[in-house]
């Protein structure tokens, strides 16, 4: 659609929004900024300007000379006033600048002042729903800070709802806090799939209103996506269990059958042992709140502190660990040798706890007949007489709707033409299956006769057969097996 551009947009489109390097290196936003600014210069010729380090400074209104402590100027090189009633232009020649993220780029400044009407107030809704494209200078007023990071903030329209939040890149420590109302001027950018406003060459102004803590929007886990990007959201369950620790200090929770990634961008429970003792898989929460971040191809809820992780319950602990076990204490009862997923990357085994007491299988080693080995690296508490499913690879490769209780990594890869499974602790082989022969049936779990659930019987080939019980799963159709449950009828 066609948008009416106010005088401030026309002026700022001819002002270079210098992109300084990130704290950990040159930020790729610089190329986007320089390209966007160059394409926006339609009537004014470029001029020279001095490069800056991008640090925050306090500036006053350039037209009056007064100083306002609430205005943070993020580019000292610009001589343009950000007063919406004034714009300036220059026809001097371009100059090459240097510094992090700006090598070979061209800055422009303004020298000639003209007067126009007051600027339009752009909204985050227009930026996020596509009404305002990337590469446009925007003037957003009266929004509330909902999250604070090392060099960025999340802000939101007070009315909330879909498309109401946006990520704001500062490239320097924020001078505002959650609950502050601000006005800002910057450039819209799509950076690695995340919509942002970059204000490194614009301004961020605190209005003086504080303590405006917005109420998170309650969103179903299955609905978290683009409309809620950067919006302060809340997911809740009764309870929500931590199901995986994929990388860094992030973790996954399962909510109503949906897996939600919880980000460590603003806060991590690993850094607050007092509030979250023994944090691990099987810990639970009743609700998690935070801005919905997007990074690495995934939407992630980013809690801002301990208060955003509600009703924490530490995972259960077992009196006995895997190294306390003796041969025969565990029994492999089912093996999905040849699943229907690509590259057999979702193989799984079912393990029965024959000890009569609760045990923790963290540290359990899993081998094939070639001694290729994987390990359970997370806490895995199994009740007495309980069954658990331990799967190959990781959660990213897991296609089923039912949850695997733990993962053992890429090895061992079970051979369809013949192989066996071995369970070990630090000192003993706890169990081994009979070796199967060639021609593993696709999509049918190889199962132990339910009348022969002991470590001696499962060494015998005659104790095993392929399952005829349909595996009821919302994602994977046409397979057979009874994961994490007693097997069906006898094999013979």
Image (cartoon, grey):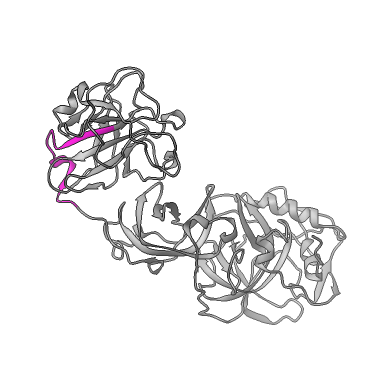
Residue 314: x, y in percent?
27, 59
Is 80 above or below relative to 212? above
- Name the one closer to the observer, 95 or 409: 409
Residue for point 41% across, 41% down: 400
Q: Position of residue 179 (x, y in %)?
A: 52, 75
| Residue 127 found in image quarter | bottom right
Give the camera-side residue of 146 and 345.
345
> Start and end of the magenta stretch?
318-334
324 in the magenta segment? yes
Q: In this orientation, does residue 102 appear?
A: no
Which residue is drawn at the image coordinates 15% and 31% (left, top)? 455
Total numbered labels placed on residues in the image: 0
The part of the image, by quadrant, that contains residue 207 is bottom right
Quarter of the image that includes the N terminus = bottom right
Q: x, y percentage for residue 360?
A: 21, 46
Q: Quadrant of the C terminus?
A: top left
Residue 331 shows up from this direction: yes
Residue 104 in the figure: left or right of residue 56: right
Indicate the position of residue 250 as horizontal and vertical percent values.
Answer: 41, 52
Vertical relation: 85 (above or below) 134: below
Based on the picture, tell me whether residue 125 belongs to the magenta stretch. no
Indicate the quadrant where residue 90 lies: bottom right
45 in relation to 203, above or below: above
Closer to us: 270 or 313: 313
Q: Nearer the viewer, residue 357 or 407?
A: 357
């Amino acid at each position: 659609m066609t948008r009416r551009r106010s005088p401030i947009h026309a002026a700022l489109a001819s002002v270079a929004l210098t992109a300084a390097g990130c704290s950990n290196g040159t930020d790729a936003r610089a190329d986007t900024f320089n390209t966007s600014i160059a394409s926006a210069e339609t009537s004014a010729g470029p001029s020279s300007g001095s490069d800056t380090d991008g640090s925050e400074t306090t500036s006053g209104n350039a037209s009056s000379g007064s100083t306002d402590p609430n205005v943070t100027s993020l580019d000292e090189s610009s001589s343009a006033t950000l007063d919406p009633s004034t714009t300036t232009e220059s026809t001097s020649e371009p100059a090459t600048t240097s510094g992090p993220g700006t090598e070979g780029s061209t800055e422009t400044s303004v020298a000639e002042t003209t007067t126009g009407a007051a600027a339009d107030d752009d909204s985050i809704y227009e930026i996020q729903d596509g009404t305002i494209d990337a590469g446009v200078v925007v003037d957003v007023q009266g929004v509330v800070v909902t999250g604070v990071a090392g060099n960025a903030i999340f802000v939101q329209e007070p009315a909330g709802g879909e498309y109401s939040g946006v990520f704001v890149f500062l490239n320097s420590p924020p001078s505002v806090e959650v609950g502050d109302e601000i006005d800002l001027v910057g450039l819209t950018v799509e950076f690695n799939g995340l919509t942002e406003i970059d204000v490194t060459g614009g301004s961020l102004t605190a209005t003086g209103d504080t303590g405006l803590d917005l109420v998170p929007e309650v969103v179903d886990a299955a609905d978290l996506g683009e409309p809620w990007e950067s919006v302060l959201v809340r997911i809740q369950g009764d309870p929500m269990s931590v199901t995986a620790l994929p990388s860094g200090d992030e973790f996954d929770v399962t909510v109503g059958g949906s897996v939600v990634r919880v980000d460590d961008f603003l806060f991590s429970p690993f850094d607050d042992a007092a509030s979250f003792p023994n944090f691990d898989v099987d810990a639970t929460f009743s609700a998690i709140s935070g801005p919905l971040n997007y990074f690495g191809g995934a939407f992630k809820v980013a809690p801002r502190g301990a208060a955003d992780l509600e009703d924490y319950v530490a995972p259960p602990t077992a009196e006995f660990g895997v190294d306390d076990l003796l041969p025969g204490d565990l029994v492999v009862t089912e093996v999905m040798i040849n699943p229907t997923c690509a590259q057999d990357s979702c193989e799984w085994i079912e393990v029965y706890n024959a000890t009569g007491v609760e045990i923790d299988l963290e540290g359990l080693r899993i081998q094939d007949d070639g001694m290729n080995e994987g390990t359970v690296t997370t806490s895995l508490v199994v009740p007495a007489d309980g069954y658990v499913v331990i799967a190959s690879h990781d959660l990213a490769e897991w296609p089923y709707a039912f949850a695997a209780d733990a993962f053992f990594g890429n090895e061992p890869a079970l051979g369809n033409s013949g192989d066996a499974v071995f369970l070990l602790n630090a000192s003993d082989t706890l169990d081994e299956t009979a070796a199967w022969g060639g021609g593993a049936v696709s999509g049918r779990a190889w199962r132990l006769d339910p009348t022969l659930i002991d470590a001696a019987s499962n060494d015998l080939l005659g104790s095993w057969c392929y399952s005829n019980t349909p595996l009821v799963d919302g994602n994977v159709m046409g397979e057979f097996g009874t994961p994490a449950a007693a097997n069906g009828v006898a094999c013979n």
